[in-house]
Image (tube, helix red, strand yellow):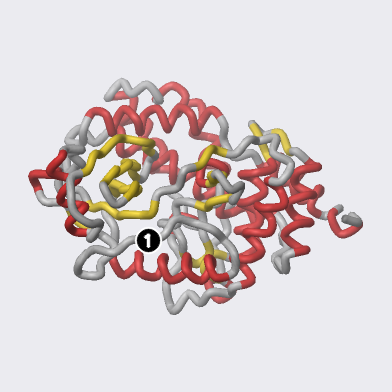
Amino acid sequence: MPDRVGFIPSQETASYLIERYQLGSGSGQLSSVARGAMGRIWRLSAASGTYAVKEMFWGADESAVKREVAFRDAAAGVGVVSPANLRTDDASYVCVLPPECGGAPVRMFSWVDGRTISPDDPHVPQWVGRTLALLHSLRHPCDGVAPDPWYDQVPEPARWYDLLAQGEAAKQPWAHTFAESTPLLCSLACQVIPADPAGAVFSHMDLQPQNVLIDRSGNYILLDWEDAGPDLPDRGLASLLCCWGVHDGVVDADRVRQIVSAYRRAGGYASLTGLESFSRNLAGFINYVAAQAAFSLETEQAAEMREHAAREVVSSLANPARMESFRELLDVVGTVGAIRD
């Protein structure tokens, strides 16, 4: 991605998007809604309605997006609700803005008026378990798509010490915590087991609380399908339980049982096979820390982006993946078979 490519929330940009995505006539207005490590969401208010624009920080491959959209559409067919993907006037999903609008690649979606979920919502475990079961039961083919190495390949120990040396030289705010955490990162990396692609099915890959909204009708809306790709079902289930059943390293056994029970009732067929089922969680955590640390050191990038990356390193290391939580989850899941719902 070219240096300093960005998104200019101007009237000109709004008009360009309205024209490219064929959203009618008239002017529009853009406002920032939220941002993450991978992109920023803008709200486009136009005469024809309201839309979500996603600025893609790391670019977007049209062929990969088409695979993602096909999977999202298949999931919608079995009841998983999500924003619709909009196409440009040339039937593409990805639109690269002209230089005068910032030059960023963007995507457009239908807008969802919704609220974030409450951790105490009693209906959440049922929805979470059922949704993963529906996605797995599609057995959506991977069609030769290779699994993303992000989920089962991690840096060698030398990489951690190299990042640490660079961070200390640059006086990064994460350097001290990183130094204390380097032995743990190396230890966790040793626990990552490469996945066997033969057992993979297409899945969402990012089904976590911040990617779910509840709309005005009470429907749960699943967002952020960009990471969709091949996944081993047991690793998908393990990841789900870590996201929804563990907080600050503490396992909520009742919630975990509810999620697994809902998953099985809805036809979910995955079973945790052991600590190797958590390899995706470990690799994702490890690679995220490494990627954010590396990006924070890239002085040619915008200061705001580098500062965000540095904060992400600190916050991630404050709540690392914990092997003891994985072991407890295995124990809890092993009791679900005796439960009567």
Q: Quadrant of the C terminus?
A: bottom right
Question: On screen, 240 above or below 234?
Answer: above
Residue ID at (40%, 25%): 174
Q: Is residue 124 left or right of residue 317?
A: right
The x and y percentages for residue 283 are 51, 50
Question: Is 300 rendered above or below residue 256?
Answer: above
Q: Is residue 276 visible?
A: no
On screen, residue 75 above or below 13: below
Q: Residue at coordinates 26% horizontally, 54% vertically from top-left?
A: 59
**Residue at point 81%, 48% (across, down):** 332
Q: Secondary structure at mark 1?
A: loop
Q: Residue at x 30, y 33 (%)?
A: 296
Q: Does residue 30 appear to the left or right of 101 in the view shown?
A: right
Count the numbered circles shown.
Answer: 1
Q: Residue furthest left?
A: 100
Give 104 or 181, whichever is nearer the viewer. Answer: 104
The amino acid type, in three-letter code, at marker 1 is Asn
Nearest the viewer among 56 and 107 is 107
In this figure, which residue is indicated by the disc labeled 1? 85
Q: Could you tell me residue 249's position as x and y percent?
A: 67, 34
Examine the rendered structure and indicate whether residue 70 appears above or below residue 120: below
Instruction: Give the image quarter of residue 163.
Output: top left
Spot occupied by residue 206 in the image (x, y as percentages of width and height) = 51, 52
Let me know if residue 102 appears in the view.
yes
Q: Residues within 10 Å of mark 1 (few under 14, many from 20)?
A: some
How far across and how far down the image is residue 223, in percent? 47, 51
Left or right of 159 on screen, residue 217: right
